């Protein structure tokens, strides 16, 4: 497998977005060096894979992985200077109707046992500005009047969500959540859930798929007609990571051809 390694020094530039932001031409932030890295979305004719270990991902048609370094969350309390997950590889592919984003990261433990803790479980999330053609909100989960759309996966309730719901011990838990926020402590669950996902832990590694239609009716969701900004976060349950305690990479460019 081939990777494009991205230095965390480069990622530090994303925090300039809090004060400066990109122009309304999203891709112009590359020229301004105020966003990055670039995750290229490959066009594909045909059905997109649902399984993160589908043979497609090791075929010649699969997109190349971009290895992104995750840094500490040092913006709000409780700050988290030493996240245990320090990098994640990202791949993205779309057809005429849908997009799939694949995340992969190392994790020696599979944390999702309710008898141990219902809080400290493995998680990962993608975040997008709802309004893709304006200056991005703060990386701190948006800001008042400038919402973000968050796709969040949790390992509780099993490995697979279809479309994000898993039954365990007679109870139903959501493993893929379609959310909004306008700043810290404002996370809200959408009544209409449009994101599907599958996560599998194998060989001390998580592989996670987020899958969604490019365009949806819900105006609280990001509409994927063009290149958009995207952020990613990963939590390791065995390291007692929760909420702001995570590995984080801020605004990067999910680039459409």
Image (cartoon, rainbow, N blue to C red):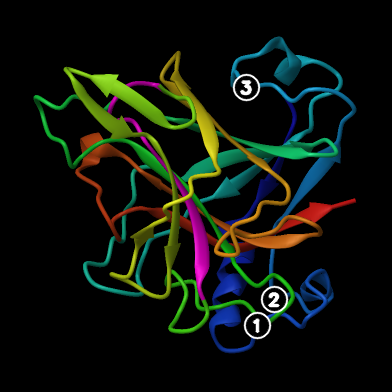
Residue position for label 1:
21
Q: Secondary structure at mark 1?
A: loop
Give the residue at mark 3: 50
Horizontal side of 158 relative to 61 (left or right) equals left
Whether 156 is among the magenta residues is yes
Q: Is residue 36 magenta?
A: no
**Residue 149: x percent and y percent?**
52, 60
Q: Residues within 10 Å of mark 3 (few under 14, many from 20)?
A: some
Q: Is the Cβ of the residue at disc 1 closer than 8 Å to that at disc 2?
A: yes
Q: Nearer the viewer, mark 3 or mark 1?
A: 3
Residue at 54 percent across and 50 percent down: it is: 69
Figure label count: 3
Separation (CA) of disc 1 from disc 2: 7 Å
Question: Picture quarter containing residue 136?
Answer: bottom right
Q: Which residue is mark 2?
A: 34
- List x then y, in percent, for residue 102: 62, 34
The quadrant holding residue 238 is top left
Which percent across, then down, holds residue 152? 43, 46
At x 77%, y 36%, the residue is 93
Q: Going from the N terminus, do you reach mark 3 or mark 1 first?
A: 1
| Residue stretch rendered in magenta on the structure | 147-159
């Amino acid at each position: 497998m081939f990777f494009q390694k991205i230095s965390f020094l480069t990622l530090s530039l994303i925090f300039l977005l809090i004060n400066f932001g990109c122009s309304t031409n999203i891709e112009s932030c590359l020229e301004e060096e105020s966003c990055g890295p670039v995750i290229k979305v490959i066009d594909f004719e045909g059905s997109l894979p649902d399984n993160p270990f589908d043979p497609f991902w090791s075929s010649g048609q699969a997109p190349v992985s971009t290895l992104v370094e995750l840094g500490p969350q040092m913006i709000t309390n409780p700050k988290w200077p030493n996240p245990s997950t320090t990098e994640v590889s990202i791949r993205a592919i779309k057809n005429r109707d849908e997009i799939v984003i694949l995340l992969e990261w190392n994790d020696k433990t599979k944390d999702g046992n309710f008898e141990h803790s219902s809080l400290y479980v493995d998680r990962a999330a993608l975040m997008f500005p709802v309004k893709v053609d304006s200056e991005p909100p703060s990386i701190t989960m948006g800001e008042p009047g400038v919402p973000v759309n968050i796709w969040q996966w949790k390992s509780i309730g099993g490995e697979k969500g279809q479309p994000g719901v898993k039954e365990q011990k007679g109870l139903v838990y959501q493993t893929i959540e379609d959310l909004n926020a306008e700043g810290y402590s404002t996370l809200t669950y959408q009544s209409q859930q449009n994101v599907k996902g599958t996560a599998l832990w194998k060989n001390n590694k998580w592989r996670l798929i987020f899958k969604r239609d490019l365009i949806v009716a819900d105006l609280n969701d990001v509409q994927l007609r063009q290149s958009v900004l995207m952020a990613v976060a990963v939590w390791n349950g065995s390291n007692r990571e929760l909420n702001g305690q995570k590995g984080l990479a801020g605004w990067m460019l999910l680039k459409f051809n």
